[in-house]
Image (cartoon, rainbow, N blue to C red):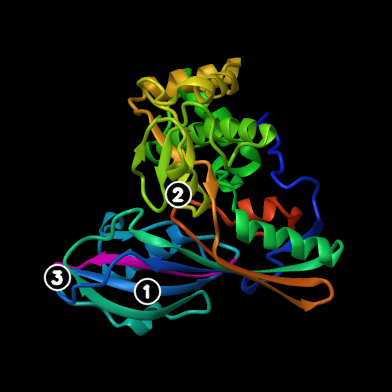
Amino acid sequence: MTDLPALPLAYGVPVLRALMRSVPEDFQVDELPAFEASGEGEHLLLDIRKRGANTVAVARQLAQWAGVPQMGVSYAGQKDRHAVTTQRFSVHLPKRVAPDLALLESDEVHVLASTWHNRKLQRGALAGNRFRLVLREVRGERPAIDERLQAIAARGLPNWFGEQRFGRDGGNVPAALAMFAGRRVRKDQRSMFLSAARSALFNRVLAARVEQGNWDGALEGEVWMLDGSRSVFGPEPMSEALAERLARFDIHPSGPLWGAGELRATGAALELEQAALADEQALALRAGLEQAGLKQERRALRLRPALMQHAWLQDDMLELSFALPPGCYATAVLHELGEVSEAPHPQAT
């Protein structure tokens, strides 16, 4: 277990308690591709719907099917196992000869489409994800729940890194601290632990902004991030033009993704970031990330789900649908509603 702090709520008290993932169909995720396939080349792009299957396991299955090393299979991002998800994979087939696609079909895997492309699919090469979630055994006052969802759709919410980033029982952050102290880890673990360390520090800064009520507003010395981009600018004095851009979600306040170099924020924004990351654990995580060679970057503090809708399927069954940019978490939306727990389901054997 880890001592990661509990995340505050931007909208006040919880409005519901519910269960999610009672069945895989209750958590549906569709990857939104970032590009059109070229129709030529030696990389076979496969759009796959998977049910109750791990992304890495499917990639391993594709490598065996194609008779290629695992490094010959790529995907843009990992998707939940206990869910129904669609995502794109690429398989490197230099001779442009693909085995029978029917051999991939199972209760867990279905190939929706296949086409050729001239480049390997890169991690992060997606435009975002579309979600359809069903919450069951919902307890709470419907008017309050409706009002909270309407507020999130209009104002947005804090752009938390979700609990998935921190591993089972939040163990990735202690593992990162052990790695920074000298414990040897595999290359894939190293990347995962570095990401968890960075995410934990970002969430600390965002938590401080939520507690002060300025997670979606401007502080003196604010660094701004363009919506849908990693581009940042500032700090610069607040103006009517910036206020208008902030109001229409063209820009967002940002927080640090830690690494070597100076924090870009100044003034009150800098003071808050330094104060939020001044305890012993945060200092150890900062030092480890700097020694690992990561550089200072920024991430938007605010997230606005697109195409957000909700419907009551039954008195105690609520359906949510929305789309999120890459690197954003559906659990950030659920967090602002209240206590949404995983329904018990059989463990993998």
Relative placement, left or right, of 193 versus 3 is left
How many numbered marks does the figure carry? 3
Q: Can residue 138 be seen in the rendering of this structure?
A: no
Discs 2, 3 touching: Cβ within 8 Å? no
Q: CA distance from mark 1 to mark 3?
A: 17 Å
Is residue 92 magenta-colored?
yes
Looking at the rendered structure, the secondary structure element under dot 2 is: helix
Q: Is 201 in front, or is 104?
A: 201
Q: Residues within 10 Å of mark 2 (few under 14, many from 20)?
A: some
Looking at the rendered structure, the secondary structure element under dot 1 is: strand
Q: Is 222 in front, or is 159?
A: 222
Q: Identify the residue at image location x=78%, y=62%.
A: 145
Query: Residue 19 shows which numbered tag?
Result: none
Query: Residue 41 shows which numbered tag?
Result: 3
Front tag of 2 and 3? 2
Q: Position of residue 290 (x, y in %)?
A: 39, 21
Q: Residues within 10 Å of mark 3 (few under 14, many from 20)?
A: some
Q: Main secondary structure of the magenta part?
A: strand
Question: Relative to 78, does residue 39 appear above or below in the rendering?
Answer: below
Q: Is 232 in front, or is 342?
A: 232
The mark nearer the N terminus, 1 or 3, is 3
Q: Position of residue 49 (x, y in %)?
A: 46, 75
Q: Residues within 10 Å of mark 1 (few under 14, many from 20)?
A: some
Front tag of 1 and 2? 2
Which residues are the magenta region? 83-95
Q: Is 89 in front, or is 229?
A: 229
Discs 1, 2 touching: Cβ within 8 Å? no
Query: Residue 47 shows which numbered tag?
Result: 1
